[in-house]
Structure formats: C-alpha cells, structure tokens
Image (tube, rainbow, N blue to C red):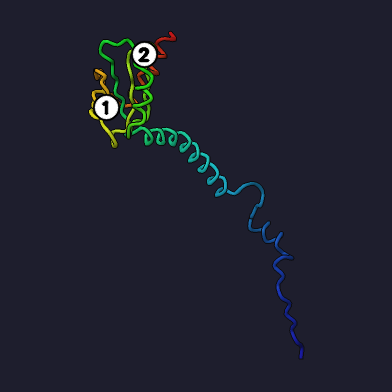
Amino acid sequence: MMSTITMAYDLEKYRDKREKVLGVKKKGISFGVWAATVSAIIIVGLISMVAPKSIAYFSTRNLDDVIYKLSGVQSWPQEIIHTITTLDGVKLAISDKDGARLVVTFDRSITDAESISTFFKENGYQAVLLNRVSHRQRIQTEQEEAELETL
C-alpha cells in the first residue's frame, strides 16, 4: 500500500505569488489613513479658529462697564480708584486719559451698578453715571476708535 504523504501548506512560502495574483499592493498610504489624517487636520484647524473666541466669550459674558464722572472735580483721586477695586464683583477700575471719567468693570452676577453708585455716595463723592455698557461692546468700540485715530 502506498501511503500518501500530505505536507502542510506553507502560507509564507507562496505569499508573494498569492499577493501578485490577487493584486494586493503594499506601496503608499492606505485610503483610511489618508482620510483620517486629512479629517484630523481639518478638525484641528476649525478648533484653533473657534476655541479662542469661545474662551473669550465665556470669560467676559457676565462683565459690564459703567462710566462715571465726578461733579465739580477735574480728575478722580487715585485712592478711590484703588479702593473701588476691593469691592466684591469689581474686576477693574481705570480712569481715562485726562482722568475725568472712571470706567469700572464689574461682574453683573455678583454686583450691580447701583451698589457702585451707593459706594460713591457713602464715601462722599458726587459721581454721575454717564453710561452702562457691555464690556465686550466697550472693548470693541475702543478698538474701532483706535483704528479711526490711526487713519
């Protein structure tokens, strides 16, 4: 009797021939990797454009500005400017170029313009409220004025 000897098929031995017949190519980057790379670049680009504006919005969304002028006095005393920044909710107090107006930036979720006016009355200052405006709007207006001054 003749015995048949079966040899195990070696996959690695004929891999090149099999891939050549099936048309499998190993050159270059696959479409999936290419598409994922392009998508990642687009998403990172969009995030880098949108994220700074979103962060700026969330950090200034509750801020308002009030502009005061003292009655009968030419400029604001420095001690009142330093004192008002210690109030709860007040983020910034600055005087304009000639010192006639005082701009107070405050968080409207913590305090309001009336409490700032009350602070001036309690300390004996006759401050007149000229305007109340959103902080972002005032910053934008200042930038537009600076642009117009350079022309």
Which amino acid type corresponds to the residue marked 2 in the rendered image? Gly
Residue beneath label 2, please? 99
Give percent across and percent down for residue 108: 28, 33
Badge 1 vs badge 2, beta-carbon distance below 8 Å: no
Q: Earlier in the sequence, mark 1 or mark 2?
A: 2
Secondary structure, mark 2, is loop
Residue beneath label 1, please? 119
Please indicate whether residue 19 sits to the left or right of residue 92 in the image.
Answer: right
Residue drawn at (23%, 23%), measured in percent from left and top? 121
Figure check: 124 above or below 19: above
Give percent across and percent down for residue 140: 36, 22
Give percent across and percent down for residue 103: 33, 21
For residue 105, what is the image quadrant? Answer: top left
Give percent across and percent down for residue 73: 29, 11
Figure check: 38 above or below 2: above
Residue drawn at (66%, 52%), measured in percent from left and top? 26
